[in-house]
Image: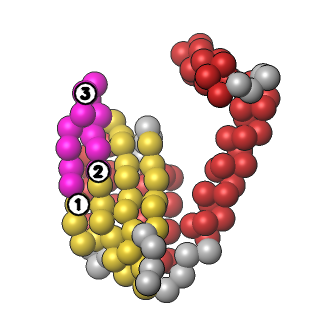
Amino acid sequence: MSLSEKLLDEIDALKDDIGFSGRSEIFRASTRLLIADNDEKKNLEGYINSILILIHPKKSEDKVTQIKHNFEDIINTQIHSHLQENQCLELFILEGDAGRMRELSRLLNRNIKFLYSKLVPLPQE
């Protein structure tokens, strides 16, 4: 596995902040979190509300727009904001079929070099 020096420095700082004994422990914990997050998404079903947060390079804006147009049936609201260093924040408020939300999240994650992506299902009554 190859990682940039900057990322390794961030991992080492995180290790010290949280109190992990080594990098391997951080990778195991990170992998468990990623699996749990994926399992949560896989188990979503039916008609739900959720929020999708995406931070991506500004140069990916056209691709995000292209993908989101295929999901207008579930996008209630979208907020787009420019952040520092040529980054964009997309906040999607979603309502509809959980499978469509998973698909939107999956397509964005697969096709965009994102810096942060999180699908947050909202509590149901």
Taking the image as drawn, is residue 59 in sight? no
Q: Is 42 part of what is drawn in magenta? A: no
Q: Name the side, left or right, on which 124 lies relative to 11.
A: left
Q: Are marks 1 and 2 in contact (CB under 8 Å)?
A: yes
* Structural distance between the alpha carbons of marks 3 and 1: 19 Å
Kind of residue at disc 1: Gln
Residue 90 image offset from top left, x and y in percent? 29, 50
Tell me the tag on residue 78: 1
* Structural distance between the alpha carbons of marks 1 and 2: 7 Å
Tell me the tag on residue 90: 2
Of labels 1 and 2, earlier in sequence is: 1
Residue 58 image offset from top left, x and y in percent? 27, 37
Count of marks, rendered view: 3
Kind of residue at disc 3: Gln
Could you tell me which secondary element the residue under label 3 belongs to?
Answer: loop
* Structural distance between the alpha carbons of marks 2 and 3: 14 Å
Could you tell me which secondary element the residue under label 1 belongs to?
Answer: strand
Please provide the residue range marked out in magenta: 79-90
Q: Are marks 2 and 3 in contact (CB under 8 Å)?
A: no
Q: Residues within 10 Å of mark 3 (few under 14, many from 20)?
A: few
Which residue position holds label 3? 84
